[in-house]
């Protein structure tokens, strides 16, 4: 009886898809920080 060996994951960190996801997260973080700074500036302006 043979044992079943799980196949290796196709997603490696050096793949372009991983880089695209990381870039998207960084852009989302920057957008969130910009929005937060804009809200603080708006409220401080009142």
Image (tube, rainbow, N blue to C red):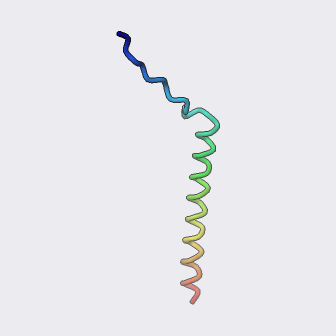
- Position of the C terminus by quadrant: bottom right
Instruction: Place residue 14 in its image quadrant.
Output: top right
Against 4, residue 40 (above or below) is below
- Determine the residue located farthest toward the left in the rendered image: 1
Q: Nearer the viewer, residue 6 or 34?
A: 6
Q: Is residue 6 left or right of residue 45?
A: left
Residue 8 in the image, given as x and y percentages of width and height: 49, 25
Residue at 61% x, 48% y is 23
Q: Quadrant of the N terminus?
A: top left
Which is more toward the observer, 10 or 4? 4
Viewer-proximal residue among 25 and 43: 25
- Rendering coords of residue 34 (x, y %): 60, 67
**Residue 43: x percent and y percent?**
55, 84
| Number of numbered tags placed on the structure image | 0
At 62% from the left edge and 39% from the top edge, which residue is drawn?
17
Point 60% across, 74% down: residue = 38
The outermost residue toward the bottom is 46
In this rendering, the answer to whether 24 lies above or below 16 is below
Outermost residue to the front: 1
């Amino acid at each position: 009886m043979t044992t079943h060996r799980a196949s290796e994951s196709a997603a490696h960190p050096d793949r372009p898809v991983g880089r695209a996801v990381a870039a998207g997260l960084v852009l989302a973080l920057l957008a969130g920080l910009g929005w937060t700074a804009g809200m603080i500036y708006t409220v401080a302006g009142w």
